[in-house]
Image (cartoon, rainbow, N blue to C red):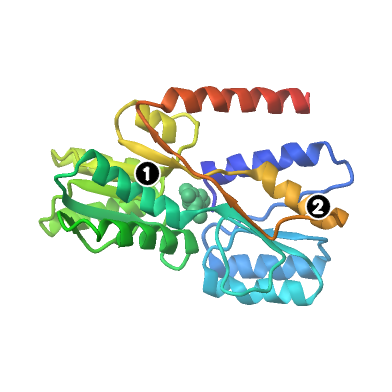
Amino acid sequence: SDDDWRSQMNREMRTVAAVRPDVELCFRNAADLSSRQVAQIDSFVREGADLIIVAPNEADTVSAAVERAEAAGIPVLVVDRKVHTARFTAYVGGDNLKMGRDAARYFVATHPQGGTVWQVTGLVGSTPAADRDRGFTDEIARFPQFRLLPPADGGWNARGAAQAARRLLAQGEKPDFIFAHNDPMAAAVGEVMQAHGLQPVIVGVDALNVGGLGLDLVEQGRIAATLIYPTAGDRVMDVALSILDGKPYERNQALTTALVTKDNVNIFRQQERQMVEREMRLTR
Ligand code: FRU
């Protein structure tokens, strides 16, 4: 995808590569098209890349290309989104099942009386969408005072989410709670709801500290909460370099999450600032 979350991850990766003159980082953007991503992976294999890092747009479609790279002897580091094959070298990504569960628990804890719940999912076919949906649905189903509407596919982007929200309202549904699988979709859905005089409690995902996104949305009260989904470009590069350098690495690295609300948003901002300052010192 081509969005702020990816840009931040790419920036973090470049920062690590900057201190390794023997490493050349080469980016390809599939622009949410699985067929394009497959062609890009195949071309990296033909060009003789030493290692391929991939965030699979859709698990099923991209798996075969990952297997082809592995068969050609090229290590493949899968990040963020998973594949439906065990033939990859390592995986780094967030715990999406837990994030879904945490979103449901937030609604239950803050509004025990319940109400109508709706989900705008990420692209159906990508694993974070499937896992967030499963974690959320399984958890909320334990509380019958929450009525769960069928989820809609927002495709990871604001436009898809806004369209889904308009369709839902046209069906006469008025959700009290919305779990959107990322912050751009959460903001877009919030705008549509507000234009119709509705103010549901919205939880998003990503918590980027970028102008107008995650942390800003929480601070402005446009969404009630967001879950941290670490971009972790530095961790990704650490694993990639360990593989290339023949050093030990963990095959599965699960990144932690945390819920950001108005009450703790400042702590996260401060932490981010410190990390950015450290990064700047490192690259100076
Ligand atoms: C960025 C993104 C994030 C989301 C993640 C899931 O491209 O859509 O917003 O959390 O991908 O894979």
Disc 2 target residue: 242
Q: Does dot 2 land on a helix, a strand or a loop?
A: helix
Q: Position of residue 50 (x, y in %)?
A: 83, 61
Of label 2 and label 1, which has the lower sequence position? 1
Mark seen at residue 204:
1
Quadrant holding the C terminus? top right
Q: Could you tell me which residue is drawn at 67 percent across and 65 percent down? A: 40
Q: Nearer the viewer, residue 89 or 111?
A: 111
Mark 1 neighbour density, 10 Å: few (under 14) some (14–19) many (20 or more): many
Q: Is residue 169 left or right of residue 60?
A: left
Is residue 86 something one can see in this rendering?
Answer: yes
Q: Nearer the viewer, residue 228 or 194?
A: 228
Instruction: Give the image location of residue 69, x and y in percent.
Output: 74, 72
Q: Residue at x 80, y 70 (%)?
A: 46
Question: Is residue 140 found left or right of 246 in the rendered image?
Answer: left
Q: Is residue 123 visible?
A: no
Q: Amino acid at mark 1?
A: Gly
Q: Label 2 sits on what residue type? A: Ser
The secondary element bearing badge 1 is classed as strand
The x, y position of residue 254, in whole percent, is 58, 53
Name the disc covering residue 233, or none.
Answer: none
For mark 2, does the 10 Å Cα neighbourhood hold few (<14), some (14 to 19), or many (20 or more) residues?
Answer: some
Left or right for 16, reference 120: right
Q: Residue at x 58, y 63 (%)?
A: 56
